[in-house]
Image (cartoon, rainbow, N blue to C red):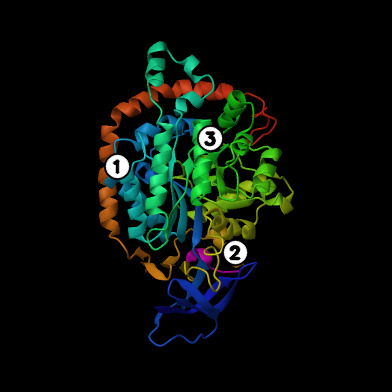
Amino acid sequence: MSLVIRGGRVLTGDPPSLAPADVLIDGARIAEIGPALAAPAGAAAIDAGGHIVIPGLVNAHTHAGSHLSRGRAGNWTLEDLLTRTAANYSFRTAEDDYLSAAVGAIEMLKTGCTSAYDLYMSLPAVTDETFEAVARAYADVGARAVLAPAVADVVFHRTVPGLLDLLPPDLRRTVEDIAPAPTRGLLALTERLIRRWHGSADGRVRVAVSPTIPNQATDAFLDGCARLVREHGVGIHTHLAESKVQAVESARRFGKTIVARLAERGVLGPGFVGAHAIWLTDDDIRMLADAGAAVAHNPGSNLRLGCGIAPVREMLDRGLAVGLGTDGSVCADNQNLFEALRIASTVSTIRFPHETSRWLDAAAVWDLATRGSARVLGLAGDVGAIAPGRSADLVLLRADSVFLQPLADPLNALVYAETGAAVDTVLVDGRVVVEGGRVTTVDERRIFASAQAAADRQREVSADAWRLAETLAPYVAAACRAAVGVPLGIDRYAAPGAAR
């Protein structure tokens, strides 16, 4: 089936610029771009007059299970958040996780994002049923996703330096009684999910491997993950050196950086993606770049959780591929990549006072959220740009949006002013999934109402888990404060001398 988008101003080229043009779509792909295009007989048409046509944005890192817990985070560090993981992610049904994933997918589409790399996590463990529910949610809503079951075979509390020694005997016994998931079982689950879901939903849903945090993975588990990547040709995505606590623990337990350990286990390669990647040394960045790996930059959650500022300029200068992500709604609060664009640019300025040539300008961060994130998802030739042969993942913005008036420099306006409020129409694979600002594929109101009921119920039944988390929290905080005082030789905080 053919479709032509007529009369809009289309953002194309390198560097991207706006020009009046039509876009002809043949099936799921862009066939031609140009003025006054001739369309095949019977082709459908969309009037894009008064609109700006941009490529669908690409979210390099999010979590489907997090959206049901939106708004619960206070002034939490990453380790505070992880202490409360059981309270936030447990006691759910498969339908609850379907709703959580659907809420996130709807929000992404309505704010101009058509694709996401989603590390889906669930406690006590991801199951075939819950993963199926999340894959079905993405397929129903109509978004594109690389979906990875984020799992671990080491309990989080054992990865916080000095924590167990701080706990009183009864609390320590409680923590030590928490059993890790079985390594072989996690690998078998991941392989089943790859075989069942990779390439589903007409190719819009793909599956990857995710040892969720390297410090929470045994060597045997990392070795098994590397094997799955080799055997099935899929990607691998992990949370990489997100906090100083993680970097300190890796040095303490393994005698090397997290990246060096992953390289030793054969995990690094062209399909490897490290989310956050804040506490990296220069050698870490070199190893990642030399391996052809990529990084998912999440500036909003990095700041929200006090993790630090990622060395993105150094990564780009070294030739490392970098994409832009939102992270999950429980810590980053929303799935709006327009917000992430602005944060990514503005936070880069404080790392290089008066060295404006090293700042990430509008063009640089726009590239992160489009071509960079497409590379992260393994879709570099398909999404992230408007060009013949690419997937027809397109977004029509109302040109009369208050955030685009007056329009001097399109990229500056999109990065620094636009909020996603101008999104009018969205296509994925040439199919209209948002029209007039509303999702066309599912009943938004029903999903939101059901999600609210599920969130309320889950919070009530997880009361005991919340009490345990609140009891543990002061001890976790004390252990982390001690850990961040350990010298590492790099500083990713804004406070002078804080990292020693």
Image quarter of the C terminus: top right
Which numbered circle lies on residue 214? 3
Mark 3 element type:
helix
Badge 1: how crowded within 10 Å, few (<14), some, or many (20+)?
some
Labels in figure, total: 3
Which numbered circle lies on residue 411? 2
Residue 17 lies within the magenta run: no
Which residue is the extreme one toward the top? 169
Q: Is residue 104 visible?
A: no
Q: Which residues are magenta?
A: 401-408
Q: Label 2 sits on what residue type?
A: Leu
Give the number of the mark in front: 1 or 3: 3
Magenta stretch, main secondary structure, is loop
Q: Is residue 426 above or below residue 117?
A: below
Image quadrant in which you'd find residue 250: top right
**Percent from the top left, x then y, of residue 294?**
60, 49
Image quarter of the N terminus: bottom left
Specify whether 249 is left or right of 448: right
Q: Where is mark 1, residue-wise? A: 455
